[in-house]
């Protein structure tokens, strides 16, 4: 069975084309994506006296809350860990319960434990329109909230610090943290069903206590 959803540890991949090291694969049956916009909405005093109709003013300050909820199951799987550049990768087969325990431990950790904490969710899907709006054959790319076009161009008109729409499966996924994770261990099955909620955010601190706020919001 092919995996299309991964949890990426803070330690990251072993190079830009490595999609196996320091990640946890998941078998997901349902992906629920939620985007909620926050705009202060204020009634204008006395507006109804002049027009006979009250008026509200909304100030769009670019604030939204984004989250992803996953439902699926965990099977016994092979996971690759590499703890330093001077060591070879360790490829080990973990039971389903061991993987569930690993994820629970991740939720309980903080961003300064990069070999424990998950800071990125990879959810791959087929895309047939590239960043420059060229048609292309179906390509697996990670879901995120980026728009097509260079900074200030195409869909990014007015967005001077935008990030490019993904072009391949190695591009950036969804940065954030696991809000909650629950699983069911049943004696009648070898797999473990789970529910996971992932909040979208630039987490601080991340990887090092000395990480600056500027780095966290870039």
Image (cartoon, rainbow, N blue to C red):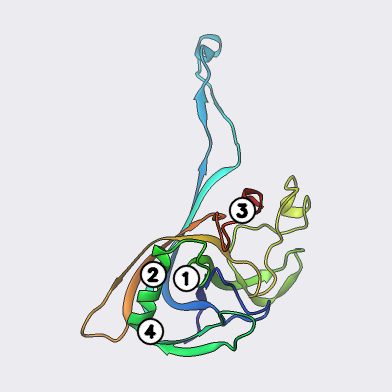
Label 3 vs label 4: CA separation? 34 Å
Q: Residue at x 78, y 52 (%)?
A: 153
Q: Do callouts 1 and 2 mark residues in contact (Cβ within 8 Å)?
A: yes
Locate residue 78, reporting x and y percent.
Answer: 46, 88
Residue 49 in the image: above or below residue 210: above
Residue 170 figure quarter: bottom right
| Residue situated in front as seen by the camera: 213 or 6 | 213
In terms of secondary structure, where does tag 1 sit?
loop
Task: Name the disc covering residue 105, or none.
Answer: 2
Q: Residue at x 70, y 70 (%)?
A: 167
Residue 138 in the image: above or below residue 120: below
Q: Residues within 10 Å of mark 3 (few under 14, many from 20)?
A: few
Q: Do callouts 1 and 3 mark residues in contact (Cβ within 8 Å)?
A: no
Task: Name the disc covering residue 116, or none.
Answer: 1
In terms of secondary structure, where does tag 3 sit?
helix
Locate residue 81, reporting x and y percent.
Answer: 53, 82
Q: Earlier in the sequence, mark 1 or mark 3?
A: 1
Q: Residues within 10 Å of mark 1 (few under 14, many from 20)?
A: many
Label 1 vs label 3: CA separation? 19 Å
Q: Residue at x 67, y 67 (%)?
A: 166
Task: Name the disc covering residue 216, or none.
Answer: 3
Task: Name the disc covering residue 32, or none.
Answer: none
In terms of secondary structure, where does tag 4 sit?
loop
Q: Earlier in the sequence, mark 1 or mark 4?
A: 4
Residue 53 in the image: above or below residue 79: above
Label 1 vs label 4: CA separation? 20 Å
The residue tagged 4 is 75
| Residue situated in front as seen by the camera: 191 or 92 | 92
Q: Residues within 10 Å of mark 4 (few under 14, many from 20)?
A: some
Q: Residue at x 54, y 78 (%)?
A: 22
Q: Nearer the viewer, mark 1 or mark 4?
A: 1
């Amino acid at each position: 069975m092919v995996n299309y959803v991964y949890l990426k540890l803070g330690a990251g991949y072993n190079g830009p084309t490595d999609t196996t090291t320091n990640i946890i694969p998941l078998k997901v049956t349902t992906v629920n994506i939620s985007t909620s916009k926050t705009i202060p909405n204020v009634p204008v005093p006395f507006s109804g006296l002049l027009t006979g109709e009250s008026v509200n003013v909304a100030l769009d300050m670019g604030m939204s809350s984004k989250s992803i909820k996953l439902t699926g199951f965990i099977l016994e799987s092979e996971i690759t860990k590499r703890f330093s550049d001077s060591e070879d990768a360790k490829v080990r087969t973990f039971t389903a319960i061991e993987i569930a325990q690993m994820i629970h431990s991740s939720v309980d950790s903080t961003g300064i434990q990069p070999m424990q904490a998950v800071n990125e969710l990879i959810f791959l899907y087929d895309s047939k329109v590239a960043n420059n709006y060229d048609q292309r054959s179906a390509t697996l790319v990670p879901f995120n909230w980026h728009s097509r076009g260079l900074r200030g161009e195409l869909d990014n008109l007015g967005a001077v610090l935008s990030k490019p729409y993904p072009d391949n499966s190695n591009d950036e996924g969804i940065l954030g943290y696991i809000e909650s994770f629950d699983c069911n261990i049943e004696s009648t099955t070898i797999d473990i069903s789970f529910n996971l909620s992932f909040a979208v955010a630039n987490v601080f601190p991340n990887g090092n206590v000395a990480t600056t706020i500027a780095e966290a919001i870039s």
